[in-house]
Image (cartoon, rainbow, N blue to C red):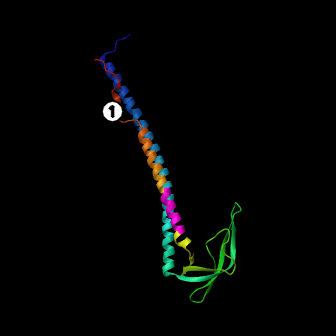
Amino acid sequence: MVPLNENKIRCVTIYLLFFKKLERTYKTREAMESSNKVKYFMAIFFLIPIFFIGYGIKFMTDYRNVDEYGVHLDAEVTGFYEYVDEDGESSIQPIVNYTLTNGKVIRDTLNYSSSPNPYKVGDTIEVMLFEDDLDTVFIHSSFWGITFPLILIVSGVLFMAFLLFIFRSNLSFKRDTEPSNDDSSDNNIFYSE
């Protein structure tokens, strides 16, 4: 067996330390890329509750603006529009007539549907609208003014809290399972002098 001199041992030690650092750098880079993918995925998922919260707030403010500054009219149900989806489920929208303050009679299909149908022909529904914007007509009810927007807002907040919990636990799990970056583990190679 050929005796190893001190210089050869140090040279081998330096090479081993270099490759160990290189391997750790590669694993760290791979973990960072994986972590970035998770962050992008979570960012996309955070858009969903933000949409729910934003739409709930917008719907509530639009409803309150029309309630406060718009015109309240009585609309008579004259018929129904039935929509059947791919699953065979039907939803029914009331067709109403209402008279604007200038005397013009408007026939409109309301954008609110239900199944089963709560209305019958001849029923009166209180609607709210701006006379210069006939595309936005609200049914005056506490459900559409308070309950529906709050359902959207609370659902968005709960979904956001759920995502934050998952995201936080995911990060703490990764932090607990990642290898330590301290240099004390580099001293595992013995020197002989």
Q: Quadrant of the N terminus?
A: top left
Tell me: 73 left or right of 165. Answer: right
Q: Is residue 167 above or below residue 134?
A: above
Rendered location of residue 131, percent (x, y): 54, 83
Residue 45 seen in the figure? yes
Residue 30's image quarter?
top left
In this picture, residue 22 sits left or right of residue 140: left
Residue in view at x 44 percent, y 40 percent: 31
Q: How far across and down, in percent of the image, does residue 21 sit?
A: 37, 32
**Residue lying furthest right:** 88
Is residue 156 a member of the stretch shown in magenta?
Answer: yes
In the picture, residue 186 is in which quadrant? Answer: top left
- Identify the residue at image location x=34%, y=12%: 3
Overall secondary structure of the magenta section = helix
Residue furthest out toward the top: 1
Q: Residue furthest left?
A: 193
Residue placed most toward the observer, 111 or 116? 116
Quadrant of image for the C terminus:
top left
Residue 131 visible (yes or no): no
Q: Quadrant of residue 89?
A: bottom right
Q: Which residue is mark 1?
A: 183
The location of residue 121, given as percent across then percent down, is 69, 79
| Label 1: few (<14), some (14–19) or many (≥20) C-alpha neighbours in 10 Å | few
Dot 1 falls on a residue whose secondary structure is: helix
Residue 104 falls within the magenta-colored stretch: no
Q: How many marks?
A: 1
Region in magenta: 147-159
**Of 123 and 43, the residue lying toward us:** 123
The correct choice, above or below, for 179 with respect to 104 in the image is: above
Amino acid type, residue under disc 1 in the picture = Asp
Residue 163, given in percent of the width and then of the height, sits at 48, 52
Residue at position x 43%, y 36% in the image = 27
